[in-house]
Image: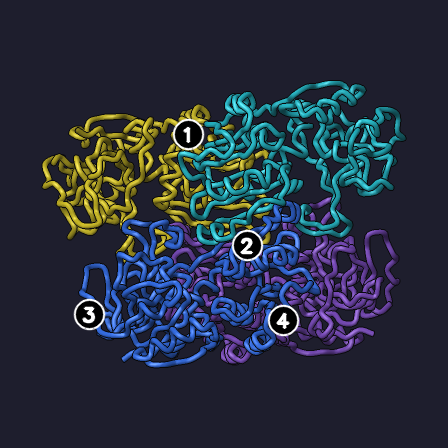
Chain colours: A cyan, B yellow, C purple, D blue
Amino acid sequence: MLAAYAVSQSSSDPLSGLVVGERPDPEARPGWTVVDLRAAALNHHDVWSLRGVGLAADRLPMVLGCDGAGVDADGNEVIVHAVVPSDGWRGDETLDPRRTLLSELHDGTLAEKVLVPAGNVVPKPESMSWETATCLSTAWLTAYRMLFTNSGVQPGGTVLVQGAGGGVATALIQLGSAAGYRMWATSRDEARGQRALEIGADRVFASGERLPDRVDAVMETVGAATWSHSVNSLRPGGTIVISGATSGDAPAKAELTKIFFKQLRVVGSTMGTREELAQLARLVEQRRIEPVVDSVMPLTDARDGFARMVDGDVFGKVVFTVG
Amino acid sequence: MLAAYAVSQSSSDPLSGLVVGERPDPEARPGWTVVDLRAAALNHHDVWSLRGVGLAADRLPMVLGCDGAGVDADGNEVIVHAVVPSDGWRGDETLDPRRTLLSELHDGTLAEKVLVPAGNVVPKPESMSWETATCLSTAWLTAYRMLFTNSGVQPGGTVLVQGAGGGVATALIQLGSAAGYRMWATSRDEARGQRALEIGADRVFASGERLPDRVDAVMETVGAATWSHSVNSLRPGGTIVISGATSGDAPAKAELTKIFFKQLRVVGSTMGTREELAQLARLVEQRRIEPVVDSVMPLTDARDGFARMVDGDVFGKVVFTVG
Amino acid sequence: MLAAYAVSQSSSDPLSGLVVGERPDPEARPGWTVVDLRAAALNHHDVWSLRGVGLAADRLPMVLGCDGAGVDADGNEVIVHAVVPSDGWRGDETLDPRRTLLSELHDGTLAEKVLVPAGNVVPKPESMSWETATCLSTAWLTAYRMLFTNSGVQPGGTVLVQGAGGGVATALIQLGSAAGYRMWATSRDEARGQRALEIGADRVFASGERLPDRVDAVMETVGAATWSHSVNSLRPGGTIVISGATSGDAPAKAELTKIFFKQLRVVGSTMGTREELAQLARLVEQRRIEPVVDSVMPLTDARDGFARMVDGDVFGKVVFTVG
Amino acid sequence: MLAAYAVSQSSSDPLSGLVVGERPDPEARPGWTVVDLRAAALNHHDVWSLRGVGLAADRLPMVLGCDGAGVDADGNEVIVHAVVPSDGWRGDETLDPRRTLLSELHDGTLAEKVLVPAGNVVPKPESMSWETATCLSTAWLTAYRMLFTNSGVQPGGTVLVQGAGGGVATALIQLGSAAGYRMWATSRDEARGQRALEIGADRVFASGERLPDRVDAVMETVGAATWSHSVNSLRPGGTIVISGATSGDAPAKAELTKIFFKQLRVVGSTMGTREELAQLARLVEQRRIEPVVDSVMPLTDARDGFARMVDGDVFGKVVFTVG
């Protein structure tokens, strides 16, 4: 089958280890299902794998990709859930310390077929396009869990998204807006701020700008650079949900006194459960949300998609059509 | 001041005890504020007061009304919160066993002025009309708490509203739709079912009809007549939120075995807190929700409004303009 | 291996279908583990299986038993978790509509060996006896989830247990007392009431007796006979946790008006998760709780144990030693 | 009346501003109640007030004290709740940004009488001594909220207390032990570690020592010095509850990447609600907990008690008897 896979890793030239070519078809396995993919999509995770972060070198070659949608062995249209729990795990699979994401231990979704545990698919709503469906597995799932499981915000509340533009931040704005939250965003870049307004943000502020009101929650994916601003922007009892720290966590003050005195909550969040993915799919269908897509191309052109990610010039998802 | 107030009570002819006429202005009181009302609205509670239910006869004459919006003593545009806690109460005021609603112990909102504790107002969003604002105090607040505090449903989930048409049911459909829930409703009446679809319901079913899927939550305001259907319609772990039981609770089976085996939750809900009212107002403004209004008339015509309620022929709120 | 198993079913003479004799050893299976049992214990569930309730006739012969503790294939001392989720299930396994208990689809614990999924064991604390460990799998786990996951009561709160004496009720009293709750119990039988006091209840009341204070939560395993008393005994905002309805649910009034007006919560609860079982084991060890044991006998005498259960004359667990 | 009050403030010599002498009796006020105190107790907060932290100079002279128990105007034996919400506040009073503690705006409890809002007392259980009752208002209430409202730990779970010895840390160990938690503590001082074991800690570790297992929650009152150890000691999904930061928050790394990847929760906590105080009182009575008391002396000797606090040589509460 055709696949985009890593054969070697390089932090300076990640594309050097990427091959788009033939890999053996996955073999059927009891309790697992083979999905014939119709679409897949890229995440920064895929570039990190090529840079040598998160993916062990002794597991190469490895098919990349966490986002995917297709038709399973029983003929059902499904969205792939990328979080694979260890054998015998019970409960929330994102808390399993031995969980892996697709493309870390098992081959991923940038291929014509992917083999996943039977519990790692959810129904694709009938009216949903393959391009939309494949966007949901990772960044959108992460945003869903941050906003709806972890923020504690009720409809009518105000949520600040630090750093409009990234895949998760974009999903946060679109999802929060669809669920009756007032979405505010910060951006260092005027054009990205403008795009944020177009997809549902109510207001956009410059990074670090003092807000007109205290917010109920902050969605934090930036890290050290915005941490103190996040703490200061919250109302008493408010929540920071943190997922990722792209600017690092070294220089950040912990701001412990403010956290204690204002009774703030800081909640770490990563990926989401299969059940959250199923709810997300229903919400996206229900409210006719169209995930922002940067570009759509056939899987054969996967190298071009990776190049866009590496250049950092994307707003929204890079989607591959398959077959 | 002009007011609509009860002077006597009759279960058979509730309007016989209603006077629309002059009452003394409320006197200022430390810790309380006088609101110059701009709009008020009716609830079934007002008719029950005239029927002799809930309002003690020795408190007559009593100005009726729980819904109101106007300008407080400091010049702020506010929405009135009708739940008055007892002195020294701490925590969720709807759990105070000695709480009262306006018009039960203190004069209500169907007047040119109302005296309320300083804690019983929330800001009216600037762009919101007085007609919209006054609809929120009671039925809409009840619906907000049912859906967003008590149902446990996340966006993308499916909620069944038993008995489309009532004030709370209408608010539930409009609110749930605005917050990304899939709203289903049952109705015994085709025209009301049609109206439910127009205001945001995804599907409408005949009362007692078997649903195509199990739902995440049922909003139950009917009671005995729909109780077993509610229990049977839920997925494992689902929730029934119950607020009111207009068809009575005598003949209902408790369905204890199903509740236990499917691990259902049944949650009683009544009115809502001041903080929930504030969030509701922000949500209604944020998503430009327009509460369904049956009719708008000046407070001088309050008797006509009561007559509509008694006749049972309303769909949405009966609103009075004041001043 | 030696086992106690069902070969036929009879509602009038359940013991007629019980055989205590040889069964083939379980065969190893990938992802599953064989536990060499050291102790097992009885539940009413085992008698129901013999009566033809819950266990399909076409699955006979079936080794009975949900409670067990022993040594797994890796040499670890473990307690067996009896809730077996279906393949691919994610999240809380007690909510899986296709879950089974041991002895419903897979052979149970009343045997020298039992084959269970690798995820269906938790560590036995080193200092805990086999007799104590084997009591925890079912009735104690049920009680743990009712009290600590579902009641919402904080330490210092008051909990009413309806019907002292049953296995779950006994566990509730011992657990709640160990966790800082004030435990009250009702009983129709003076001797059982006395026993309840001895194992940690603060006060015991006659069935249906009016309580001196409203309680924070009621643990309800009786059903129709106590339901109205349970509803009436709660403070506003209080919780009834219901697990089982031994007196049936047919005649119970739903009491919907009181549930709504006092904002009560009714929460169905059945069994518990593997993680809850692990926490329970730590609690029992930590506080040196000794489950009330009715009698201990070798598995060869299993028929005597079943006879005690059928006669209804037990207070606490009937434990079998194995090997 | 006799009182211990501040007349001036000095960071270097806090006792210089303390007077133990006569103050006018409080005057009755509608909605407030005068409590005839029987006992009071010290907190670090009282020393901070004398140092010029938290108490505005223009409010002097001010009677100090947040801990108190006595007899209210209606003859009820009560414990004083020190959190005074602003007029019209609704909901959790610890989240009111305009709340004050007794001795910040209104005279405190180190006196023969104190005037408090009617909502600021809870019943003292009949069998509880005045010395025990007065310990609960502040440090014990703080510990109760940290453990039982904010930690998310269920009975059987393991909780680490950073810095055994302080008033809150002592209360945490005694409360957690009474509620079925496994309590671990760290200490820089061997004697204090030994005392922690005596009052209920299961194990004590040196500050910063690697723990044998990951814990479910950490109770953090130290701050920067222990922060990284707290983050590293938690299991995935675990919780740090932070109340106070006696070692400052400046040098602490935020550890954002670990918080996100392990999905930790950090929850700020300060004081507690009136309802939590009432539950605490019931728990302390129920389990016969005896708060560790450093010393008991008559209020006339209050200066000696303050001197002990300033010297930092206390383990447990300094209690004053009154009248």
Measuring from the top left, give residue D254's x and y in whole percent. 59, 48
Amino acid marked by disc 4: Val
Judged by depth in the image, the label closer to the viewer, 3 or 2, is 3
Judged by depth in the image, the label closer to the viewer, 2 or 4, is 4
- State the quadrant of the C terminus of chain B: top left
Which residue position holds label 2?
Answer: C268
Establish whether labels 2 and 4 are both on one chain. Answer: no
| A19 relative to B182 in the view: left or right | right
- In the figure, residue D44 lies in which quadrant? bottom left
* Numbered label attached to residue D204: 4
Which residue position holds label 3?
Answer: D25
Precedes in sequence: disc 4 or disc 3: 3
Does the residue at mark 3 contact the one at mark 2 (Cβ under 8 Å)?
no
Does the residue at mark 2 contact the one at mark 1 (Cβ under 8 Å)?
no
Amino acid marked by disc 1: Gln
Does the residue at mark 2 contact the one at mark 4 (Cβ under 8 Å)?
no
Q: CA distance from mark 1 to mark 3?
A: 52 Å
Q: Chain of mark 3?
A: D
Q: CA distance from mark 2 to mark 1?
A: 37 Å
Does the residue at mark 1 contact the one at mark 3 (Cβ under 8 Å)?
no
Measuring from the top left, give residue A98's x and y in whole percent. 75, 49
Q: Chain of mark 1?
A: B
- Which element carries disc 2, helix, strand or loop? strand
Q: CA distance from mark 1 to mark 4?
A: 53 Å
Which residue position holds label 1?
Answer: B286
- Which element carries disc 4, helix, strand or loop? strand
Q: Chain of mark 4?
A: D
Where is C65 relative to B34, above or below?
Answer: below
